[in-house]
Every structure is written in C-alpha cells, then in structure tokens.
Image (cartoon, grey):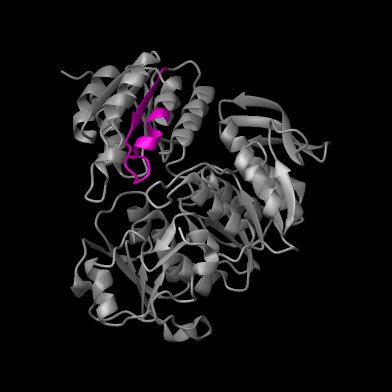
Amino acid sequence: MRKLSEYPDADLRIFERPDPPEADRLRDVYLIGICGTGMGSLAGLFKEAGYTVSGSDAGTYPPMSVRLREMGISVHEGFDVDHLDPAPSLVIVGNVCTPTHPEAAEARSLRLPQVSFPEALKSYFIRDRKSLVVAGTHGKTTTASMLVNVFQTAGIDTGYFVGGVNIKDGRSCAVGRDEYFIVEGDEYDSAYFDKRPKFLHYRPSSAVVTSVEFDHADIYESRDDYLEAFAEFIRLVPEDGLLVLNADDPRAAALARTARARVRTYGLDAPGVDITATDIVATDTGQKFSLVVDEVHVRDLELAMSGRHNLLNALGVCSIALDEGLPVSAIAEGLRSFQGIQRRQQIRGQAGGVIVVDDFAHHPTAVKATIQATRERWGNRRIVAVFEPRSNSSRRKIFEEGYSAAFRGAEAVFLSSPPFRHNDDPSNFMDIDVVLRNIVAHGSIAFKASGADELLRPLLEFLRPGDVALVMSNGGFGNIHERLLVGLAKGPQS
C-alpha cells in the first residue's frame, strides 16, 4: 500500500468533484454497491439531507435492504448501464467496483462526477464539524454506535455514520444539527481510483483505536503495511485533540509513540491505564462494573451487552465522553440503554427450545470473542457455532490456524466451505479441511458443507432444546437464521 504522502490530490484527473459549498446544485446521487453496510448508511445520510437517492447492487439482504426500502430509496438488483440514464449529478463508487465494472465504466465514459464513499462522507457531511472517529480491527461498529447513544442521551444531536443498524431505532446514520460528527473509521481501501484507507479521509478531531490486528490480507501486503495505515491515521489527530488507545492490545498501545495528540489509555489487564473497570459481574442481560478513572472510583455502571470485548468498547466510549465533558449520569444511562447493533450478538428468535443468534464476526479474533461472550451469557447451554468464511480476508490460508483455535469454546462447529473467486490465489486459499481436522482434534464436533442449503438439514438434526445456534458471517449466509427458526418450529426432522 502506498503511503499517504505518495498520493496526489486526485489520482485520476477525470474525476471532477462537485464543490460541497455549492451542494444545492447537486440534487440526485447514485451509489454503485448501495447495499453494503457503509454505502447503505451513506445513502441514508444523503436521503435525510434532502437529496434524491438511488443505487444498485448485485444482491440485497437484511438489515440494509430493509432499511433502504423504509427510507424510500430506489435500489436496482444487478448492474446495468441503463441505470445511469438519466445521468445523476454525482456517482459514488463503492470499493467493490473494479475499473471494468459496467456502471463504473459507463460513469467514467460519460464523465460524470465520481467520488469514493469516504470522500463523499467527508465533503458533504463531516466537513468542518468536530469529527470523533472510532477505528480498530475489531469492535469499531459497536463502539461508535455506543458512543452515539451516550451523546444522544446527553441531549446532543450529533451527526453520525456507522456500518451497522442500531437495534434501538433501526438507524445507522444521521445528519445531526450539533457540532459533533461520530464516524466509524474503516481501514479498507476507498475505491479502485483511491487506494487510501477510508479512515484517512475523516479529519479526526479525536479518535479511538480499539485494536490493531492484521486483517484485510487481500489489500495489505504484510502486517507492517497494515500497521503503517493505522500510524498514518493517528498522525492525523491534531495536537489539541485526543487519541484514546486500548492498552490491552500491544499494537494499539504502541501507536502512542508517534501520536501528536494527547493520549489516554484504557484496559482491563494493562498496568497504568487511565481508565479501567473493576468489580465486573456478568448478568443475564449484560454486565455490571465499577468505572475507575485515574485510579479513582467514579461510578458503578451497567452495560446491556455481554463479553469482555464489549466492556473494553464501553471503556473507550467513556474515555471520549468524559474528555468532551459529558455528565457521568448521561454516560451511565447511555451504556445501560444501549441495545446493541443488528448482527452483533443479536437474538434472531427462539424455536424448539433453541436460541438463534446472529453475529457479524468473521476474523478469527472476533469469532473467538463472540463465542466467549455467548458462553458468558448462556453458560448452561451448548454453543453450536455456524460459520461462513465469506470475506476476501477470511478465506486466506494465513487464518487457518487462527480459526482452528477460535472455535474451541463451542461444543460443535458447522462450517460453510469458502467460495473460490476469480481473483483468488490457490496457494494462498484456506483449506477448510485443515480447519475441520484441527477443530476435531481439540475435542469439538465439526461438520462442513458447501453452503447454507447443505448445512441446514444436518444442523436441524443436531440441534436440541437448550442449545444456542450462533451464526457468524459478514454476509446474508443464505438467510440461514430464519430458515433455522422455521425448521426448528416444525419439530424433529423426519
């Protein structure tokens, strides 16, 4: 990956960016790849701001497809050059597009103004506001959403953009009227014509880094390359801003060495942190803990989410909120009332005595943390993990060992074989049989199939009353969650 200093202001001169101060001339926006979590949220922002919004995607699935429909946004299933007739004022190109993508190529041929989604987010919504950016390999969506809830509880009408849908109000974004804009900072690249990580666009006034662990092996050549992206990001936080680091993660903590901003740390194990939690008690609805700031007990708090990783997320939220002067009472109520994000430990339903849980986890560390959190919440139940390695990164051979260890907390594991795509390197592709054998060697039951259709029947035959079926994927997974509930409701399979 090229360093930030190596990028010109515009990699391709044909991309003519509309001037945001004259945005009244821009009335219709078209998004290629609109059903992705980020693109769908951006579409919502433009819609709320009064623009006519439409877009296209190869496939649509909840929760984003539902949200777009509720907002009255027109979505084309599939890609076709005719979708750009009449020509929109602005085309936002998702990072799934290649230069030869039919709609992207047509927009280029017509010389339509085009931008990446992070550039659009910055230019039309963040602009001169106080940008609070939450970054990290894991936990950034939950942490950013939790931070939004705390600010809203404090009576602040913050703008925000996160890559997930809030269970409480079904939203993932808002324009907001006050000075703050809270944004989830993703380290993935921006577009085929802008290979910078998205979070380098967001002009952070203050930032949180929840974790730094090698990911996105499809675009980062090495761990050092990945770490450099985060180093570039934290150097954007100004001297009068605040950088909040999870000190339990050594790589995140190490970013303090190159920071220009003030640094505050949080953690549960690392010595000498500025903010920590004590007296932690797991409950049926989440966990309780005592907030300790600069070695002083501040208040007993309640978090309506399970798992150590979510407690760390809450400490990061407290760090930013306290620095911005929010009342402790608002922080306490904001954490207590936060119901979580769709597809993050979300209970999709219960049938036949089995609880079906949906989670976005796809990196080995996230899979492990999600299983541990599920174990904490339902310690007296069997945990049956159902996993789809779908993302470009999760299908890489480098993560075989990580996945083998990640599933140790589950009594049984049902794996969907990773799809081999045209741009995959066979020598660097995950061998699902290696993962399967290692899971069995560690004492768990394991089963594989080509996808949701073939997994469903053996899964229904295996599940019994009292189990938790923990489904993990960053995609739709063939709607296996709802199909499981329907099958379980019918009773034992004949």
Residue at 76% over, 47% down = 328
Front-lying residue, 269 or 325 = 269
Q: Is residue 9 visible?
A: yes
Give the quarter of the figure containing the C terminus: top left
- Return the residue found at the far left: 494
Quadrant of the rendered image containing residue 291: top right
Residue at 39% over, 81% down = 13
Give the quarter of the figure containing the N terminus: bottom left
Front-lying residue, 47 or 408 = 408
Q: Horizontally, is 213 left or right of 111 in the view?
A: right
Relative height, residue 283 to residue 179 (above, below):
above
Q: What percent of the width, then of the height, locates residue 169?
A: 49, 52
Q: Is residue 249 magenta?
A: no
Front-lying residue, 47 or 244 = 244
- Return the residue found at the far right: 296
Residue at 55% over, 60% down = 160
Q: What percent of the width, then of the height, locates residue 67?
A: 38, 56
Relative height, residue 445 to residue 199 (above, below):
above
Q: Which residues are magenta?
A: 382-401
